[in-house]
Image: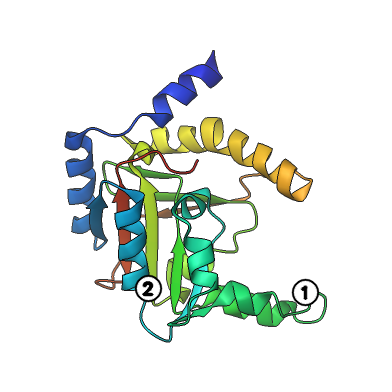
Amino acid sequence: MTTNLSQSEFTHLASEKQIEQTVQALQTHGIHVVIFATIEEARTFVLDLIPTGAQVYDAPSRTLEALGLPEQIEHANRFQSVRARLSTFDPMTQRHEMRKLVAAPDVLVGSVQAITEQGEVLIASASGSQLGAAVFGASTVIWVVGTQKLVRTREDGLRRIHTYSLPLENERAQHVYGQGSAINKLLTINAEHEPGRITVVLVKQQLGF
């Protein structure tokens, strides 16, 4: 019963009123927001927003996969893919160099698990690899978010993470990595002090977990 309720509660798209309230709160807290109806519009916007010559880290994300952004970023000529560079490193001997690249890219592109009507952004992670860049390391942060991830309160956001996002991510991790996932690190962004640093791209479609 709990799983069915979670599926229903956390997969329906937000109403126009909820979107408006959330956008107003985010922008009051220094986070820029744009809204698109389709993934095609969102994908074009994100790629256009990335500066020429930038080092770009795309954090693991089912949302980005749905937009086809990992492939676009990896094979881009106008900017540099951090993931492509990481693939040339030896994790056994160059772990420190890999950490530095991921922690401070020019641009971080990713997604989040929940955004509240009070403008709080919640991100859960097993390794925390994307969190340092999100907090401070990246000069530009772009989060693509389906509007089914908008919730009323922080408590609702945490419940979404634990009862909905985690079981789906655990299943995916088992399939891809042969081991489950966990909420080892949990980040809440209440506001951004540097104007224009964070952009939330809201898409009126169900995207990601």
Q: Is residue 191 left or right of residue 56?
A: left
Question: Going by the picture, which residue comes out furthest to the right?
Answer: 92
Q: Position of residue 137 (x, y in %)?
A: 47, 75
Q: Secondary structure at mark 1?
A: loop
| Residue at the image position 37 percent from the left and 69 percent from the top | 47
Would you say residue 120 is visible in this rendering?
Answer: no
- Quadrant holding the N terminus: top right
Quadrant housing residue 154 = top left
Quadrant housing residue 141 = bottom left
Question: Going by the picture, which residue comes out furthest to the bottom?
Answer: 53
* In the foreground, 176 or 23: 176
Q: Secondary structure at mark 2?
A: strand
Query: From the viewer's perspective, is residue 61 above or below residue 109?
Result: above
Label 1 or label 2, whichever comes before in sequence order:
1
| Residue at the image position 61 percent from the left and 80 percent from the top | 100
State the residue position of label 2: 140
State the residue position of label 1: 91
Query: From the viewer's perspective, is residue 35 above or below residue 49?
Result: above
Would you say residue 171 is visible in this rendering?
Answer: yes
Look at label 1 and name its amino acid: Pro
Label 1: how many Cα within 10 Å (few below 14, some 14–19, many 20+):
few
Q: Position of residue 185 (x, y in %)?
A: 58, 52
* In the foreground, 67 or 95: 67
Q: Position of residue 60 (x, y in %)?
A: 57, 57
Give the Cα distance between marks 1 and 2.
26 Å
